[in-house]
Amino acid sequence: MTSTRHETEVVAPDDLPVVRLVREFDATPDRVFRAHVDPDLLLRWFGPADTQTRLDTWDCRSAGSYRYTHVSGPMELVSYGSFHEVVEPSSIVQTVAVEGMGDGVVLERYRFEPLPGGRTRLTVTTLAEDFTTRDQIVASGMEHGVREGHERLDALLADGSVA
């Protein structure tokens, strides 16, 4: 299978406090899903290239939890939450909170949709409490980190690191 360059689409609709990420991958849903739930694989692609990620807790199953730290120079950003539903290889539903950013929690749903030719469309829908929180998420620079992470994931999928 030849790899084509795919772009991550980031959409924040005017009428909902939602951020939607859509990205196609030249790999099956099983493989893309595995790269999202296997801690060793996740650490190889998650986040921007200039950031190290440390998994403090990772129990990726329905009713499990997680906590990770992004480290960039002297800055550390801690995110944590619960996995509400993990259905292999089709979806993950989780909450996300960020230490030091108040009591706000967002709800995320990852959908891994099979496409012709053994490909996958990943749609991540993040539902925020309000438009202000949604706009803060968009303004945080997350788009840059997500795009770089998806490019790194493309490389892992292409080189056979994800069986």
Image (tube, rainbow, N blue to C red):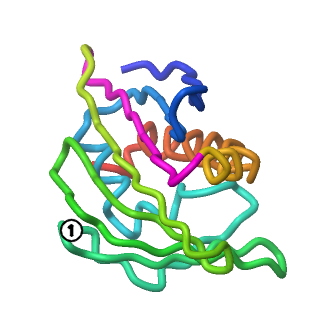
Q: Is residue 150 left or right of residue 100?
A: left
| Overall secondary structure of the magenta section | strand
Please name whichever residue, 155 or 28, is drawn nearer the observer in this view of the structure.
28
Q: Secondary structure at mark 1?
A: loop
User: Is 127 one of the magenta-colored residues?
Assistant: yes
Residue 135 at what x, y percent from top left?
A: 69, 45
Residue 113 picture location, percent across and down: 26, 29
Q: Quadrant of residue 65?
A: bottom left
**Is residue 115 or residue 4 the one in the foreground?**
115
Q: Crowding at label 1, few (<14), some or many (≥20) Cα neighbours within 10 Å? A: some
Q: Residue furthest top?
A: 116
- Write the residue at 38% across / 34% down: 122
Residue position for label 1: 61
Query: In which quadrant will I find the N terminus?
Result: top left
Q: Nearer the viewer, residue 144 or 95?
A: 95
Q: How many marks?
A: 1
Q: Is residue 127 left or right of residue 84?
A: right
Q: Residue furthest bottom?
A: 56
The quarter of the displayed image where residue 102 is located? bottom right
Residue at (63, 53) in percent of width and height: 133
Q: Residue at x 50, y 38 (%)?
A: 154
